[in-house]
């Protein structure tokens, strides 16, 4: 059993802890959270102890850490875990500042510890199947990728103010999807954005609705569209066009029930939000991390992926602000 | 925590044990199985003990039993559990003989213990939602019900010989669905059957492909179609026509991936078989049983339901053999 | 150009006349209808003349007749056309009485004129494609057929009284579909029926909701479900299960528009009724009739098909009245 | 009856002539085409005469012209028809040069003749329904529009060389869709393109795969993706996101047949190309033109629409060539 110290006992922390317990190959040893009550509650469910960071990282029985605390603590915890020789599972983003990410990754790299960045969507069964069929050549060479990613509702302004902004907070997931699907690094980004959902978002210098184009050196293209508010729920779709066909993956629904009556034919809205839609993805990503630690497979999404998605997010932000297409070093 | 003794550590037993553990409101105390190794393995995973039936039922800490052993042991275990004052969760069918079912239910009834019969499909999220919307009047009065239920492949002949035959083994689930959806008891059954999948099935006096019609006193109608072999997987669909519309619920698929190429547009086959398709249903049915024990809700599917499905199965068998429509006491 | 005399200038007559004009290979020469005004209007549109039956049939330039007049005139017109040596396109049914059908077909057969019975659904592009792929062996041997056929609303009681009843008026189309799809004649029929839409239908000895089972000698089975009222429109679906898979064909909709909002995902109801749903089928059936006259292809649906569907309808009616399964001579 | 002179007897000319005949409100009087044989054939089918341009336009009985000749003749024919006082139905584009379009429209405007530009997609039943529901406010305010438009295969190089290039030849239809759906003029265009289908396209300075973004003054956004080759057929979809929901319209298929077997679930590819997919759209657009001439409705898509789509195409071309976002005067 791989013994784990987990940082963060909030919403996403509870998901990871449950998946660790169900994995059959890991055991939660420590929970660390500044909110004592949450930490105690979570530790209690899985027979773990609440300790501080230092204690958790000093224990040689701890082989890996799960970092699910607030974003501003990620880089520091990665550095401390790396120095302690622990394998790292870190929720995205590593940090909102590219300079800090670079500093962090330099240390992680020097420490030669395995690191996994939590781009959960890669582990959604539909998206994972699509990508693996794509790589297997089912539709020939990739030509165009379209990622539609729309949240059900605007988060509170208090969150938005510290989120890093639309591109670094929300679109960053889609940049990772685009990289993963294209199979070739984008070298140019053009982004449009506006505060169409709520003008208050514009007043803090952010936007809530964006459209982005990306291009690779060989001419492959990708489009991302985002909105912070899809009244019908959480809209998560991908579409890839290749030289020999098209692959699409769509939304999941709570049920398959369809009603036909004198008004219309109606069916379910998509599953409401990421906890529901990506429940299986969270299970699979943790299993992939643990599997890589067991040496069975290589780490499927690492530090460099976390960094490159941020590079694209920063380029998009710059494009949005300047109105110009921005070159990106692949 | 409700402490449980479970009989049976086979395929379905493992599912119930995992769901008990995940429920948060029950604890597996004992596992009983003639196959010692399976019992030990299962008990080991959940901190339970392997004991014999007598010991398990004698322990006053055991409040309920889960009967997931072979069909021929169900009635006897129900009787013994009832006499020991335990609440009963019994896999369907209670027994293949109506006389034995009646004898068993008489004792259960006298013992006044709660009893739940494992008609898992009622707890499938899509079917459950359809039925509750139906009862809520969304499509007016029920008029016609259609249940399509097709297994992916013929079981071994050794199983078929002791299965009780097509109607008691497989169609019995659909009879329960029909009763549950119609909301009124069928009073007449007509059934056709043939061994279209494998003539060997016909040689043992059974059939593998059937079509059934049922009628209630007020004129509502239902149709069931079955096959032991659907080359595309496990086909489980329901369709209800009411005075104001139609409700349908269909198959689930592993992914939402759709491919379009020069040949066709292709998508996933249904989830392969009942363990996959009804994974959520198994979770929900156990939660419903435990919830009823906690007194929060009434037992949603009880001994009388188990009995009446068998009554319809016997009527269908008689109809199939005689070529005549058979009256049924509701 | 094949010159045509058409009997009947009503709703269905106008459709056939338009399709004749558009066919490019036929010309409407005469229109015969007791309702003078309708006849004049229709003839005027296509440069035809209004004449009486005798004149129309006496003209040697008329090679074929289209019989789209009221049902009670079909058999007599078939006989007179056959005696005049004209090829016959006759709307279904040939007659509501099997005895009269037999008398009529004897004369048609003796006259050796080609005869086509208007089972339009065989020419619906989706159904035709399904059936031809079925015959091509795409899903192996046929095992079970399901035909769902539901009208949008109850016709007036005045119509129902002379319609010949549910089985001969409405289900007859489905009996033809079942024969065509099974590829083997049914030898037994069992039917249930009730007046669920309107009790007034029951008072005239008819029913408005039926479920039927049919069986062939080799054990293939078919199910038909009908209602005179589907609040969501005209529901026309077929489903065939074979040894190697399943083929289904569903409803058509006016548009592909799908809306998702906070309430649900909604899409179009099916096309409203047979004139819309089977517009293409009417074109194709007439083309098939004209093509057969040109000697290019054999008559795809003939007098014997019209007769056998009526035989099944009568058996179903008898089953409905007696509660017994009825044997049918194939 | 509105008497018509039609210029062009090729593929699209034959469609318009057939729709004129079927409309019931127009009569084809003259056909003009440099290819005498085609002109004679088409005129023969509808009782029209083959004449030269001068004769056709000199006849006061001719009220309107249908211009379906080669693109390079459109502007000149519009000018001559306008001077002759004829109403104009002109296939898109009016011309590939914006200067010539402006010169032409100045004369048409001065002549005060009605003019219709053949943006057929606006008349596709699904797209038309979507747009009218959008304008009716079903999903609130428009925020983002996505147009996917992919042809089944690369046209011959000989065509591509005189086509005006990807943006003016193909994307122009999508620019019109975007304008029509947004309901507000785009003020900025950014376009990416590459020759992914065939490098030979790149050698003549054109591209065959493009992605475009457009923005309006108020911040609404649109995305277009194109390819000259979709191996699965003709892919024509639109998706509009509004403040209260989403509207989508998809592809049409030849049949609704779905097959499930041991390999997969398969269904039809989209209708092959524009003649099949937009057959109804062509009927409806001509009906709209004739209806507007009858004074019943206003001309739904006029000269200014033809011009503005070309303005956007030129901006996209400039963006593609310079790598910069291009401002557009609305």
Image (tube, coloured by chain):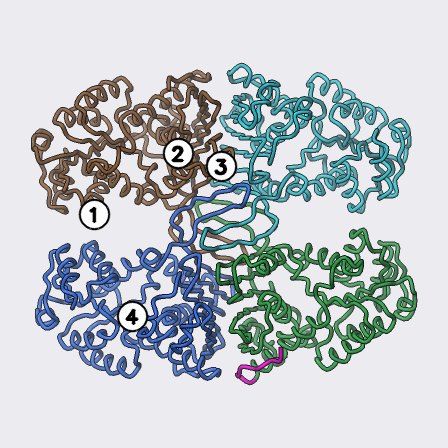
Chain colours: A green, B cyan, C brown, D blue
Residue A286, by quadrant, is bottom right
User: From the viewer's perspective, is C191 left or right of C314?
Assistant: right
| Callout 4: SS | loop
Q: Magenta region: which residues?
A: A322-330
User: From the viewer's perspective, is D191 left or right of C115?
Assistant: right
Q: Which is more foreground, mark 1 or mark 2?
A: 1
Marked residue chain, label 1: C
User: From the viewer's perspective, is B38 left or right of D255?
Assistant: right
Q: Which is more foreground, mark 3 or mark 1?
A: 1
Per the model, the C-alpha gap separating discs 4 and 1 is 28 Å
Q: Quadrant of the C terminus of chain C?
A: top left
Residue D219 in sight from this viewpoint: yes
* Marks 1 and 2 in Cβ contact (< 8 Å): no
Residue B63 in sight from this viewpoint: no
In terms of depth relative to the viewer, which is nearer, C130 or B109?
Answer: C130
- Name the residue rendered at 57%, 83% in the picture: A321
Marked residue chain, label 3: B
In the picture of the structure, the residue carrying the numbered disc 4 is D92
Give the percent coordinates (x, y) of residue C274.
33, 40
- Name the residue rendered at 21%, 74% in the picture: D73
Give the percent coordinates (x, y) of residue B326.
54, 17
Up the image or down, D286 lies above or below C51; here it is below
In the picture of the structure, the residue carrying the numbered disc 3 is B241
In terms of depth relative to the viewer, which is nearer, B272 or C18?
Answer: B272
Up the image or down, C87 lies above or below D254; here it is above
Q: Are marks 3 and 1 on the same chain?
A: no
In the picture of the structure, the residue carrying the numbered disc 1 is C22
- How dense is the environment of label 4, judged by Cα within 10 Å: few (below 14), some, or many (20 and up)? many
In the picture of the structure, the residue carrying the numbered disc 2 is C228
| Callout 1: SS | helix
Give the percent coordinates (x, y) of residue D136.
41, 63
């Amino acid at each position: 059993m791989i013994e784990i110290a987990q940082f963060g006992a909030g919403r996403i922390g509870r998901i990871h802890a449950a998946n660790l317990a169900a994995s059959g190959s890991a055991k939660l040893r420590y929970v660390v959270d500044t909110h004592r009550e949450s930490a105690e509650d979570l530790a209690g469910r899985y027979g773990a102890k609440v300790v501080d960071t230092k204690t958790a990282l000093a224990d040689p029985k701890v082989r890996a850490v799960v970092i699910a605390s607030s974003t501003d603590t990620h880089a520091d915890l990665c550095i401390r875990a790396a120095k302690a020789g622990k394998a790292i599972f870190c929720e995205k983003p590593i940090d909102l500042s590219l300079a800090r990410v670079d500093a962090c990754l330099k240390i992680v790299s020097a420490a030669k510890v395995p690191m996994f960045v939590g781009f959960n969507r890669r582990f959604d069964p539909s998206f994972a199947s699509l990508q693996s069929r794509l790589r297997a050549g089912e539709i020939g060479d990739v030509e165009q990728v379209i990622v539609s990613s729309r949240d059900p509702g605007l988060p509170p302004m208090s969150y938005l103010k510290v989120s890093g902004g639309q591109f670094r907070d929300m679109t960053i997931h889609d940049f990772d999807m685009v990289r993963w699907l294209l199979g070739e690094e984008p070298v140019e980004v053009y982004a449009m954005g506006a505060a169409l959902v709520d003008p208050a978002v514009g007043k803090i210098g952010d936007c809530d609705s964006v459209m982005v184009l990306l291009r690779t050196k060989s001419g492959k293209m990708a489009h991302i569209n985002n909105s912070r508010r899809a009244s019908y729920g959480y809209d998560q779709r991908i579409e890839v066009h290749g030289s020999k066909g098209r692959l699409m993956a769509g939304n999941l629904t709570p049920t398959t029930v369809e009603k036909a009556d004198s008004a219309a034919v109606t069916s379910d809205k998509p599953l409401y939000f990421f906890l529901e839609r990506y429940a299986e993805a969270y299970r699979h990503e943790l299993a992939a991390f643990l599997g890589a630690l067991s040496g069975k497979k290589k780490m499927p999404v690492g530090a460099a992926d976390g960094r490159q998605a941020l590079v694209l997010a920063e380029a998009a932000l710059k494009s949005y602000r300047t109105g110009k297409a921005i070159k990106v070093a692949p």
